[in-house]
Image: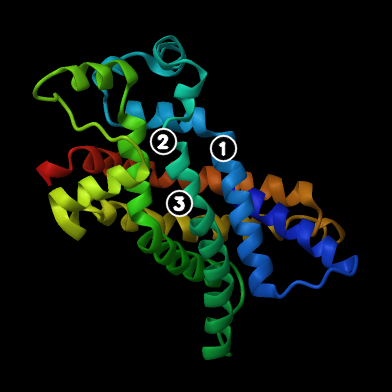
């Protein structure tokens, strides 16, 4: 889970700082968020690819289920098929996670400084997390669109399209080709197709994630709150709860990204 890994990365850097390696706070937050995001996305890339194919109701995967989808990908594309589009995912998640976590801390500080009487606690974390999530989404959304487009492509269908005189679907050769093609066909607006449900989802998701995380931390003994394991546990449960609550909007976003010409 991204939230859990980010908190763990921050903990590691805090240990390094106590060991004599001084790192500015903003830089520490950027590095921790970026590294945690990249590692997390690579770790769950196979599940993410299957999720996108099922969410977008790709014909070859309808009714396949999780295990059946894994088998189909392995049979038609081999092990590397599980990582199709993951390059765009990592290219996006590193700045996204870094910006998300740093923005959360900055917005939280700004709110406290701007409103000295505001009560610090889960509600503050909910507001700061929501605004930070929206900021990160707007800044990196085109790469999320590219990740979906590339992951949606299935090797067999792509080869068939390349052999036909009139391709049955648009074939993208990589991140830059996908960005250029979408921009040429739909302009700047096309690069942000589907962002509305993303924002509708990210505001409650990010807010709830940080809210649940900070709330659960209050139940951890004071002497263990900076340990990596409690941070991982709290972050994992917080991310799970936030993702489950906002999942329907994630499905709508993927559908819009694939069927963008209909919206």
Element type at marker 3?
helix
In the rendered structure, find residue 92 and report the number of the disc placed on it: 3
Q: Going by the image, does 258 lie left or right of 1?
A: left
Q: Is residue 76 above or below residue 259?
A: above
Point 87% across, 60% down: residue: 223
Q: Residue 40 location in percent, x, y?
A: 59, 42
In the rendered structure, find residue 218 and report the number of the disc placed on it: none
Point 57% across, 84% down: residue: 112
Disc with the residue nearer the chain's start (3 vs 1) = 1
- Disc 3, disc 1: CB below 8 Å? no
In the rendered structure, find residue 85 and report the number of the disc placed on it: 2
Q: Going by the image, does 158 lie left or right of 232?
A: left
Q: Residues within 10 Å of mark 1 (few under 14, many from 20)?
A: some
In the rendered structure, find residue 42 and report the number of the disc placed on it: 1
Residue at the outermost right position: 19
Disc with the residue nearer the chain's start (1 vs 2) = 1
Q: Going by the image, does 164 lie left or right of 141?
A: left
């Amino acid at each position: 889970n991204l939230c859990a890994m980010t908190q763990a990365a921050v903990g590691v850097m805090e240990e390094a700082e106590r060991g004599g390696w001084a790192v500015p706070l903003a830089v520490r937050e950027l590095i921790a968020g970026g590294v945690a995001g990249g590692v997390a996305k690579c770790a769950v890339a196979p599940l993410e690819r299957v999720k996108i194919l099922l969410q977008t109701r790709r014909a070859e995967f309808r009714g396949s289920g999780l295990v059946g989808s894994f088998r189909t990908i392995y049979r038609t594309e081999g092990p590397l098929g599980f990582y199709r589009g993951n390059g765009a995912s990592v290219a996006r998640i590193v700045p996204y996670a870094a910006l998300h976590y740093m923005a959360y801390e900055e917005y939280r500080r700004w709110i406290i400084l701007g409103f000295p009487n505001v009560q610090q606690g889960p509600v503050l974390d909910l507001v700061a997390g929501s605004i930070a999530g929206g900021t990160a989404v707007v800044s990196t959304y085109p790469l999320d669109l590219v990740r979906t487009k590339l992951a949606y492509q299935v090797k067999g269908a792509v080869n068939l399209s390349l052999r036909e005189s009139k391709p049955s679907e648009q074939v993208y050769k990589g991140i830059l080709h996908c960005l250029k093609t979408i921009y040429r066909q739909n302009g700047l607006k096309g690069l942000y197709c589907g962002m509305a449900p993303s924002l509708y989802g990210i505001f409650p998701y990010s807010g709830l994630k940080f809210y649940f995380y900070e709330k659960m931390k209050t139940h951890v003994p004071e002497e263990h709150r900076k340990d990596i394991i409690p941070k991982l546990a709290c972050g994992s449960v917080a991310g799970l709860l936030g993702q489950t609550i906002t999942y329907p909007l994630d499905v709508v976003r993927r559908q819009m990204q694939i069927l963008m010409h209909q919206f």
